[in-house]
Image (cartoon, rainbow, N blue to C red):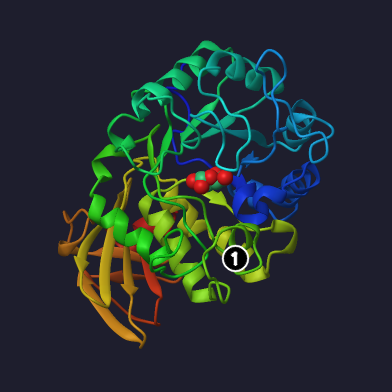
Amino acid sequence: MTGDRLARTPPMGWNSWNAHSCAVTEADVRAAADALVDTGLRDVGYEYVVVDDCWMAGETDDAGRLRADPDAFPSGMAALADYVHDRGLKFGIYSSAGSHTCQGYPATLGRERRHAEQFADWGVDYLKYDNCGDHRGRDAVDRYGAMGEALRAVDRDIVYSICEWGESAPWAWGRNVGGQLWRVTDDAVAKWTTGDEFGLGIADIVDRVAELDIAAAQAPGGWNDPDMLQVGNGPESGQSRHEPTDIERPLSPVENRTHFAFWCLLGAPLMVGTDLTDARGDVLDLLTNEHLVAIDQDPLGLQGTPDRREPTREVWSKRLRDGAAVALWNRGEAPADIRVHVDETSVPTAGDRYAVLDCWTGERWESLGELSATVEPRGTAVFRVTPGDYSAASSTS
Ligand code: GLA
């Protein structure tokens, strides 16, 4: 079906990969669906429950159709989709635009129609489509285009998540092949920065997004995807154990906060990647921070961009329907005073006074344009700034 109505705001949900990696079972997915309801995450907008790699059996059937792994998913994918739908959520699945998935399971290249029909029959609402396996000499636009066409041909709305890691500039063609989101980097790992290891840390991804300078590619219905959230994760999470990256400790509370704040400021898809059956209260509070989620889900759909980048102090902002979000990031190892005037940011500067909301504390005040904060090491102050006086803005957001 036509995807024009899909993902008008960045998709939100949960994906199995970062939490469970290749050991995922249907019990894990059901537990995640239940947890989205019980924790209140569903009610703030997290709606897709996506099973990543390793759900399929090692062989297709004789017609080349994918089969669920009989041990890990004994009830089958249609039953799992029903379970997810019964909880008011949507169901997502994974395959790859190659002969095999990244973990070596059968994938979709050359069988796009058949698999799209299977997915539609099962009640799939979201497809994450990876870039592993043999490409048989076909370029990315051709391979991702074939699946986009197959998804358009089935009688079901399926969000198309292009996971091509930014290798052939998917921001330039992702929308044209029917995609609603496209990965722009390598995989995120649960670490602040990585060196030559597998994957990118949180700060590395923000740097990469700044360098790519692709904000113009993003608008409602088409999202730059800096990868799934590692909020709440550390050495014990599934992906950390699976990948070769050396992860010594969990992301700290302040690193989690900066990570989530930046994904919201970027207007990124928010796919939770932690085990929600075991998540700490501060992690759940962060993921449900209504002020940040509102910045992510702002109807204009713009990507935040850097206004100022210094070695330890950065200022980023994102224009919103009624003003802008401004983030002051301390990349250093000591507390830092960071100040900026709204003139230097995306805040519309028609007026002479601004209502300011601190997205961490919920405090509100009025400013003549100056914004400042003492920011803890690796921390980020986030303000929602609305032209006009405090009383005019205090009823919104
Ligand atoms: C790739 C993707 C990840 C995940 C794994 C699964 O690395 O980028 O997001 O889907 O494959 O094998």
What is the secondary structure assignment of the residue under circle 1?
loop
**In the rendered view, does 222 fall on the left or right side of 112?**
left
Residue at the (39%, 82%) spot, across then down: 377
Amino acid type of disc 1? Answer: Gly
Q: Residues within 10 Å of mark 1 (few under 14, many from 20)?
A: many
Residue sitting at x 47%, y 45%: 269
Q: Position of residue 20 (x, y in %)?
A: 68, 53
Picture layout, residue 374 above or below residue 100: below
Q: Position of residue 167 (x, y in %)?
A: 33, 41
| 377 with respect to 275 (left or right) | left
Splitting the image into 4 quarters, where does residue 146 fall?
Answer: top left
Pick the front one: 343 or 163: 163
In the rendered structure, the answer to whether residue 287 lies left or right of residue 32 reads left
Residue 77, by quadrant, is top right
Please state which of residues 320 and 395 is positioned toward the viewer in this rendering: 320
Does any portion of residue 386 appear in the rendered image? no
Residue at image coords 46%, 50%: 227
Looking at the image, the residue that sits furthest to the bottom is 334
Picture coordinates of residue 103, whole percent (x, y): 60, 43
Q: Position of residue 324 (x, y in %)?
A: 30, 55
Residue matched to label 1: 232
Task: Name above or below for residue 132 compared with residue 253.
Answer: above
Determine whether 21 is above or below 379 in the image: above
Instruction: Give the tally of numbered discs.
Output: 1
Image quarter (top left, top right, bottom left or bottom right) of the C terminus = bottom left
The answer to whether residue 229 of the structure is visible from this angle is yes
Depicted 331 relative to depicted 351: above or below: below
